[in-house]
Amino acid sequence: MSFVLKPTSFLKLKAALLPWCWVLSLLAFGYGIYLALYASPPDYQQHEAVRMMYVHVPTAWLAMGIYGFMAVMNLAGFVWRNLLAFFIAKAAAPVGLTFNILCIVTGSLWGKPMWGAWWVWDARLTSITILAFLYLGYIILIDSFEDQDHGLKMGALLSLMGVVNLPIIKWSVTWWNTLHQPASVFRLGGPTIHKAMLLPLGVMAIAFTAFAVAMILMRTDLELLSRRVRVLNFDRIRKHLQ
Amino acid sequence: MWLSGSLYLIFDGLRDNLVFFYSPTDLQEKKIQPHQKIRVGGMVKPDSLVWGANQKVSFVLTDYTTEIRVDYEGIPPDLFREGQGAVAEGFLLPSNSFKAMTVLAKHDEKYMPAQLSQTIDRHHGQATLKED
């Protein structure tokens, strides 16, 4: 695992992976949008409104998945004393937050016609909102210290404590009475979505995920570059002062 | 540390509120008093829906153990119908019926093409096509 966590090996990985992420993302969005908006059936009870699922569900998966990824990276940073792992987490957070917000917005737009409410404070919606605040808290915290590396570690601790929210989100619809319906895909007994709708959902999930990976790769690269610029600036100032 | 502590406190304090609605059985067991603003949820009992004048509608919510009659004045959401889930927000009346200020539709986790559902209905001998 640690061979990846060196800046030089990361940059090689990024150079190799990034073009494929774009290709996969573009192809998957092309096919996915065609399926989602045209070549898939309306639902027996939601009719055409079901098509919101093809955006809302992948963004929900990514909001949670990126948070989990971020926590794993932060844990790796502590365990292997590796700063790059913290950089990757820092790069991932705004991407995850964006998907979290998209999930909430698309969910709200879907909820009004289906449930009759733009928003309810049931356990599912409340816990996904808390996730957004965890993301936000992390993003703000890491930049609240003079020593940037210390900030990354404090943020890492926050993100690790927030991991408890992930199973809460997942099982909120089982543990408590909620307006949001129970799981349709990741459940014992298999999906309760007909395969004609499972296909567009899967393709769109791949499309969004490839896009997220591309974003995280680029943002990590940016973080490495920005650190190099800071070090070079310090050197320049130091030489100037000598 | 403080975060997990506060998360725990939040969820524990919200525990009753985290339950977005009570079932009809909960209403009895928890001895909910009349005129307390609460939500009750369950399945709309088939053949219990009655439309009155002036947007008045009444129906029965059931959790297959207990039933409660709900009266609502207004237009329920599109997905609201018999045999499907609903959540009513309002308060219990002393007469043990429920006066709803808001009615929400709760749909299940099944997704199925519209035509497939029509085929299933035909095979089950139902004469009416599901409205599309």
Image: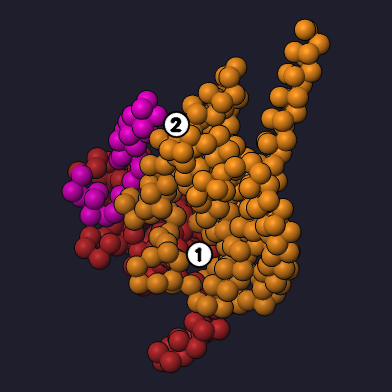
In the figure, the shade used to draw chain A is orange
Q: Residues within 10 Å of mark 1 (few under 14, many from 20)?
A: some
The residue at 35%/72% (across/down) is A189
Which residue does the numbered mark 1 point to in the structure image?
B79
Q: State the image coordinates of residue B32 (x, y, percent, origin top left).
A: 24, 42
Q: Toward which corner of the image does residue A222 lie, by quadrant?
A: top right
Q: State the image coordinates of residue A12 (x, y, percent, origin top left).
A: 68, 51
**Same chain check for tags 2 and 1:** no
Q: Nearer the viewer, residue B80 or B123?
A: B123
The chain ID associated with circle 2 is A
Q: Which residues are magenta?
A: B1-30
In this view of the protein, can residue A233 be seen by the observer?
yes
Which residue does the numbered mark 2 point to in the structure image?
A157
From this view, report whether residue B14 is shown above or below residue A238. Answer: below
Q: Nearer the viewer, residue A21 or A204?
A: A21
From this view, report whether residue A240 is shown above or below residue A22. Answer: above
The chain ID associated with circle 1 is B
In this view of the protein, can residue A52 be seen by the observer?
no
In the figure, the shade used to draw chain B is red
Q: Let me know if residue B21 is in the magenta part.
A: yes
